[in-house]
Image: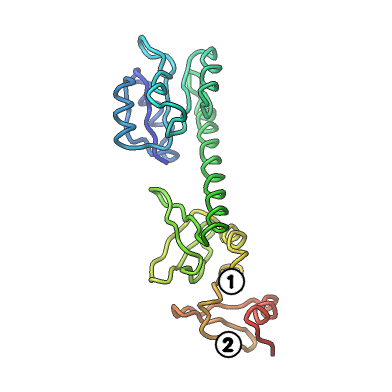
Amino acid sequence: MRAIILDDDKRILSQLRAMLDGEVEVLELAESIDEAKSLIDRFDPELVFIEAKLRSLNGLKLLDYYKGESPFEFIVITKSKAYAIEAFQRFALDYVTKPIDKEELLNAVAKFKKNSTDAVSQINHDRVRESNKIALPTQDGFIFVKQSDIIRCEAHGNYTQVYLIEGGKLMITKTLKHYEELLSNGNFFRAHKSHLINLDFVRKFIKGKQSYIETTDGMSIEVSTRKREALLQKLSFSE
């Protein structure tokens, strides 16, 4: 998550950067509206922190550069709640009052993260429905891939490693359950608590006391006992 901070108080700029460390990637600090506009044009941040009361200007005048909807979310920093009404009229995500409380600040940032997560989910469901593609979130944005290009997905705690047909792999900050639900209308099967497999890439089924699937990329994946019958039905095969 990339951000720019607009405030004409160097002390506040430094304080905000320290409080946001580890939560937000602060790209640049701006002390004037013109400087902030230049930095936004250059870096295209997702989030901007705007001080409502600059030396002689209302910091929210920054938004006048953008006719209609601004290309970023913004959180207003203010000493006076009097600016809160204008902030929300201009569709601010939230506002934080001075002196800045770190918990209040991070709660505002959490709203942005939730909105971003909801947006990714909506993009994914729309893509799956309309074009058989899903959006995989990366540090810089999204990579759109066809369901048919995914060989398998493997759980790594709250992350998922996605293996692609061309040999690439991506570590995504979503759980395997998220992708199991997202890809439920495709030819994917949760063979094990840690593995979601595209059945188009199953090369071999190995039966025995413990069953395994071998995928075309050479991976042997255990099939849980309770999933074995359902898998065989999916593969249109019965013993």
At label 1, which amino acid type do we have? Asn
Of the residues under marks 2 and 1, which one precedes in the sequence?
1
Work out whether residue 189 or residue 71 is closer to the camera in this orientation and state it.
Answer: 71
Residue 166, image x, y percentages:
38, 71
Badge 2 crowding class, 10 Å Cα cut-off, few under 14, some 14 to 19, many 20 or more, is some
Residue 205 drawn above or below residue 35: below
Mark pair 2, 1: CA separation = 20 Å
Is 157 left or right of 217, judged from the image as shown?
A: right
In the rendered view, would you say 74 is above or below 1? Answer: above
Residue 156's disc is none
Above or below 61: residue 46 = below
Q: Most extreme residue toward the top, as rendered? A: 56
Q: Using a 10 Å C-alpha cutoff, classify the residue at mark 1 as few (fewer than 14 neighbours), some (14 to 19) or many (20 or more).
A: some
Left or right, 49 with reference to 96: left
Residue at horizontal 53 percent and vertical 86 percent from the top: 204
Residue type indicated by callout 2 = Ile
Label 2 element class: strand
- Residue 239 in the image, given as x and y percentages of width and height: 69, 90
Q: The N terminus appears in which quarter of the rendering? A: top left
Mark 2 or 1: the one toward you: 1
Q: Are marks 2 and 1 in contact (CB under 8 Å)?
A: no
**Residue at 42% of width from left, 61% of height from top?**
170
- 196 sits left or right of 49 in the view: right
Give the residue displayed 55% in from the left and 58% down from the top: 128
Per the image, the residue denoted by label 2 is 206
Image location (x, y in percent) of residue 215: 50, 79
Residue 165 is situated, as x and y percent measured from the top left of the image, at: 42, 71
Residues 14 and 151: in front is 151
- Secondary structure under the numbered disc 1 in the rendered image: loop
Which residue in the structure is indicated by mark 1? 187
